[in-house]
Amino acid sequence: MNHAGHQSSQSSVPAAAPAPSAPAHGPAATGPRRTVELTGAQALSLLGGVSLGRIVFTQRALPAVRPVNHLLDLGQIVIRTHQDSDLFAQARHHGDRGVVVAYQADGIDPLTHLGWSVVATGYCRPVTDPDSLMRYQRLIRPWSDRVMDCAVRIRPHLVTGIRLTV
C-alpha cells in the first residue's frame, strides 16, 4: 500500500482469461483476481463516490467498528454522530490533537468479486463550528434512527487502496 500521492505498481500475478462461453456473472467470474494498488488520490476519489463506510476506533481499549454515512469534504472525511457516542466522546476529549481512527469503504460486486477497497487512517476531531455543523446536517443523511446532532472530521494521513480486477 502507498502513501497518498505516490504511484503504485501493479501486481505481478498474471490475469486469468475468462472462458469464452462463461457468463459475466457466473462461476467463471469468481476465478483468480489481480490486485492493483491505488494511489492515494485514486483511493480518495473512490471514497468520495460512496456514502457508506466503516469507522474503526478504540472503545474500552479494544477495536470497535461501526457502519456510518460519510461525506468527503475538501479531502477530509466527515461523519455525523450523536453526542453520547464513544467516538464523539474520544474526539471531544482529545480536542485539537485528535484521536487516531481508520475509515474503510469499498465497492465490490457480490457476484464477480471485482471492485475496490480503501482505508484512510488519520486524526479524528469534533466539528465545533456551528455553520459547518449545520452544513453537514443538511448534506449527510444518517440511516440510523438516532438523533445525529454532532459531527466529526477525519484528516487522512495515510490513504491506501486496492482494485480487484481480472
Image (spheres, rainbow, N blue to C red):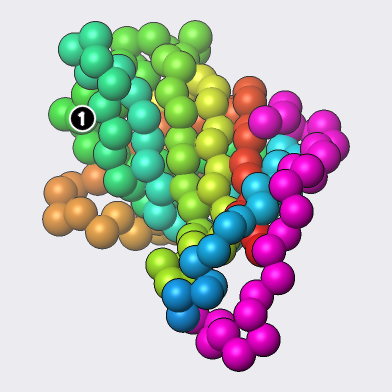
Is 84 drawn above or below residue 48 in the view shown? above
Residue in the image at 65% along x and 48% along y: 35
Is 128 drawn above or below residue 25 in the view shown? above
Towards the viewer: 5 or 8:
8
Residue in the image at 24% along x and 45% along y: 148
Residue 5 seen by the camera: yes
Quick one: label 1, few (<14), some, or many (20+) residues within 10 Å? Answer: few
Residue in the image at 30% along x and 55% along y: 142
Residue 38 seen by the camera: no
Q: Amino acid at mark 1?
A: Ser
Towards the viewer: 68 or 109:
109
Give residue 159's position: percent from left, percent from top.
Answer: 63, 33
* Magenta span: 1-25
Residue in the image at 41% along x and 48% along y: 53
Q: Quadrant of residue 80?
A: top left
Q: Main secondary structure of the magenta part?
A: loop
